[in-house]
Amino acid sequence: MTTQAELRCRCGEVRGRLANASSRTVNRVICYCDDCQAFAHHLGRADLLDAKGGSDIVQVAPASFVFVQGQHRIQGVRLAPKGLFRWYASCCNMPVGNTLGPAIPFVGIIAQAFASGAQHPDELFGRPIGSIMGKYAIGDPPAGSARIGLPLMARAIRMVLSWRLREQAWPHPFFKRETRAPIYPLSILSASQRESLRRFCGPHPTTDGRHAQ
Ligand SMILES: [Zn+2]
Ligand SMILES: [Zn+2]
């Protein structure tokens, strides 16, 4: 059975639609990396992180996801010149998708963006199948997350390869097919901006992240 899921930013201006939402068609993992934590703090959205600083990410095929409303609000930021492209809705600073770039076909979307009204991420995608980058978690690393997690990585790579084979790489919600250029405005943090976020992030934050920004 396949289900269509709605993405909704917190204020409702930006909306998207995901086709084929199911536990088999996506990869849902908790990422504890310090970049995901820094991104949430940069947006003033530490409320989206779990108690250990984890981001609940649903990885989907680019062609399975489209924005249907509020595209003029979408902006991107890179934490470093070659960092991930991290897209968000500028109306309410809701993250709406992380991408490595047009060549690697996957989009990682925070699970809370699929939580609205009667729609629950657990019902759409099942529970997260694991966690990664636990060495950056705040406090003790969650069970199994500090190791590299080869089965999880293998599953992610398998999915990306199958999306490419099944021509799920294009159209891409964040890049133009002809030029491979980003569709939306993009900024890059300066080194000092990036450094200023570290005090909020694991494994040893020195500032209470709930008061970021
Ligand atoms: Zn919004
Ligand atoms: Zn991460």
Image (spheres, grey):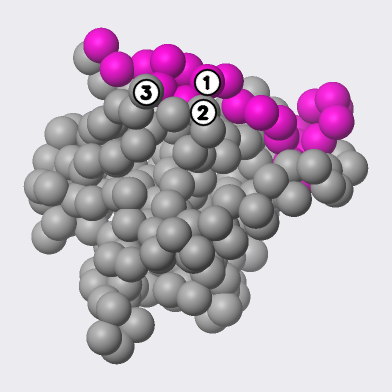
Closest to the camera, between mark 2 and mark 3, is: 3
Q: Which residue is mark 1?
A: 126
> Would you say 207 lies left or right of 185 here?
right
Question: Residue visible at 48% across and 57% down?
Answer: 163
Q: Secondary structure at mark 3?
A: loop
Q: Is residue 78 visible?
A: no
Sequence order check: which comes first, mark 2 or mark 3? Answer: 3
- Estimate the x, y position of residue 134 in percent, counting from the top left: 79, 39
Neighbourhood count class around disc 2 (C-alpha, 10 Å): few under 14, some 14–19, many 20 upward: some
- Estimate the x, y position of residue 23 in percent, counting from the top left: 51, 28
Q: Which residue is mark 3?
A: 1
Q: Are marks 1 and 2 in contact (CB under 8 Å)?
A: yes
- Estimate the x, y position of residue 104 in percent, counting from the top left: 53, 69
Q: Are marks 2 and 3 in contact (CB under 8 Å)?
A: no
Sequence order check: which comes first, mark 1 or mark 2? Answer: 2
Q: Which residue is mark 2?
A: 23
Q: Secondary structure at mark 1?
A: loop
> Is residue 177 positioned above or below 35 on the image?
below
Q: Is residue 119 visible?
A: yes
Closest to the camera, between mark 1 and mark 3, is: 3
Q: Secondary structure at mark 2?
A: loop
